[in-house]
Image: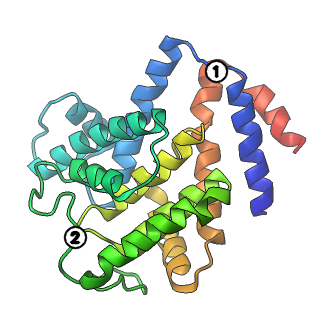
Amino acid sequence: MQEQILKRLDALKAKLDEYRPLSAGVVNNLHENMVLQWTYHSNAIEGNTLTLKETKVALEGITIGGKTLREHFEALNHRDAILFVEELASKQQPLDEWTIKCLHQLVLKNIDSDNAGRYRQINVLISGARHRPPQAEHVLEHMQSFIVWYNHDAASLHPAQRAAMVHGEFVKIHPFVDGNGRTARLLMNLELMKAGFPPAIIGFEQRLSYYEALDKAHCTGDYSEFVLLVAQYMEKSFEPYWWALGVEEEVVKLLDVL
């Protein structure tokens, strides 16, 4: 099944490539929607209570009554982090500790200056998960091994597999006190965007299956379920492009023959 969905993703990317470069109007419209959706869902997964419409207003710089200052900063910070990811993707920036720390610094800007961009000095538990991250004294060692894995074994993987495993292996280490989930999803999409795929936005409504697939991967080493989940969201991420280009029927026919 994994082979089949990876084939579908490659076909969808090839179809989108036929229309690239897209017009500035289409790009701007899709970009605004992508930033909003990604910011809302990624923050909501972590407990931010801003609705989709409230997130849109917060990104416009308007304060919403009854919501915390932290929630507003989480929205603004996430948008800035997306813009940074786009810049990194355009430069084909390899994954390294500098990139990870810079992204995390943006995620926690104006929220937790003491821990932003700094590996944790305390042991942590992932709420509700069976997996226990390594002790604080081993975080640096695990992060260095993670980068070695990325530079060698990860290179031969399909972009969907590589992105899912970058997310999973990073959050398995849980190198920061806070902001690991948001940073993991940013790193995942950095890999996808470097490979020419749209970012995969994991829906808040699917957070239970998302957490379960991650915990299974961490405890057993079997990433098949998590790769499939990411791949399904990748396929969904193409849909706004087909609507904007008016080629939904062509894409349905394309997928029918695969």
| 65 relative position to 153: left or right | left
Find residue 54 and name its label. none
Q: Relative to 53, does residue 184 appear above or below in the rendering?
A: below
Find residue 177 and name its label. 2
For disc 1, the neighbor class at 10 Å (few under 14, some 14 to 19, many from 20) is few
What's the residue type where badge 2 is placed? Val
Instruction: State the residue in front, 188 or 119.
Output: 119
* Residue farthest to the right, as pictured: 257
Instruction: State the residue in front, 2 or 196.
Output: 196
Q: Measured from the top left, where is residue 1 in percent x and y?
A: 79, 63
For disc 2, the neighbor class at 10 Å (few under 14, some 14 to 19, many from 20) is some
What's the residue type where badge 1 is placed? Arg
Q: Measured from the top left, where is residue 153 in percent x and y?
A: 61, 66
Residue under the point 55% across and 38% down: 198
Instruction: State the residue in front, 114 or 38.
Output: 114
Residue 119 in view of the camera: yes
Residue under label 1, please give it.
20
